[in-house]
Image (cartoon, rainbow, N blue to C red):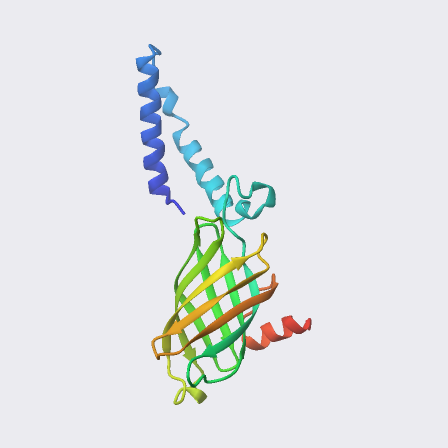
Amino acid sequence: MITRIQLSALLLVASALWAGGLVLAGVQVSAEWFQPFSIVLGALVLVLTLADRWLWRIRWLQPWMFNMPDIQGTWRVRIRPTGPAPAAEQIDAFMVVRQTLSAISLRLFTAESHSEILSARIIRCDDGTFTLTGVYRNTPRLAVRERSPVHHGAILLTVHGNPPESLAGQYWTDRSSQGEIDLSAKSKTFAQSFEQAHRLARGDT
């Protein structure tokens, strides 16, 4: 999101250009014209904040004003390791996504570990589809740390549906493992743990 300083600079430039245009048109410009500057700046900051956090999610503003898929919530995840000797056939997990128009954070919970995103971005492809890319750090529980050390990895997921109904793609890690990952059945509640996400998926309160 644009900062207040950046917005102030843009507003100053726009005001100067507007005043210059009026002068060239023969209009007399006085200092009183610039007195509402701070009020206008504050109003613009409020509008941009509302747009970044809430307005962009409104369906009728998509995609002509805001072209970004809303994937916020807790997703049910299926992880399928691949390779010559995968650690498991399938791993059940949950992905918690928090999102604004300008930023996104991801946290993955499994029964043995959690992963937090270090950097992520949603990219609009030339065909109009969206791809989520990210780099993450996985931290296993201490009880399993000997056979499953802390490691880093990357994900590449394609967003399906409008509004999004699922995400699917691949992951890679720095311990030479990889696999496929599918996200489906999103809940609007933000889970704080694997156990809470599992209760949400079962419909428990």
| Image coordinates for residue 19, horizontal then vertical, percent | 33, 20
Residue 154 picture quarter: bottom left
User: What residue lies at 57% left-to-right and 65% top-to-bottom?
Assistant: 74
Q: In this view, does 161 lie above or below 139?
A: above
| Image coordinates for residue 83, horizontal then vertical, percent | 42, 80
Q: Is residue 201 above or below residue 56?
A: below
Question: The C terminus lies in which quarter of the figure?
Answer: bottom right
| Image coordinates for residue 167, horizontal then vertical, percent | 53, 63
Q: In this view, does 89 lie above or below 117?
A: below
| Image coordinates for residue 112, horizontal then vertical, percent | 49, 82
Q: In this view, does 101 lie to the left or right of 29?
A: right
Seen from the viewer's position, the closer of residues 81 and 132 is 81
Residue 70 picture quarter: bottom right
Total marks drawn? 0
User: What residue lies at 58% left-to-right and 45% top-to-bottom?
Assistant: 58
Residue 71 picture quarter: bottom right
User: What residue lies at 31% left-to-right and 30% top-to-bottom?
Assistant: 13
User: What residue lies at 37% left-to-right and 24% top-to-bottom?
Assistant: 34
- Residue that protrudes farthest toward the top in the picture: 26
Q: In this view, does 139 lie to the left or right of 193?
A: left
Seen from the viewer's position, the closer of residues 201 and 32 is 201
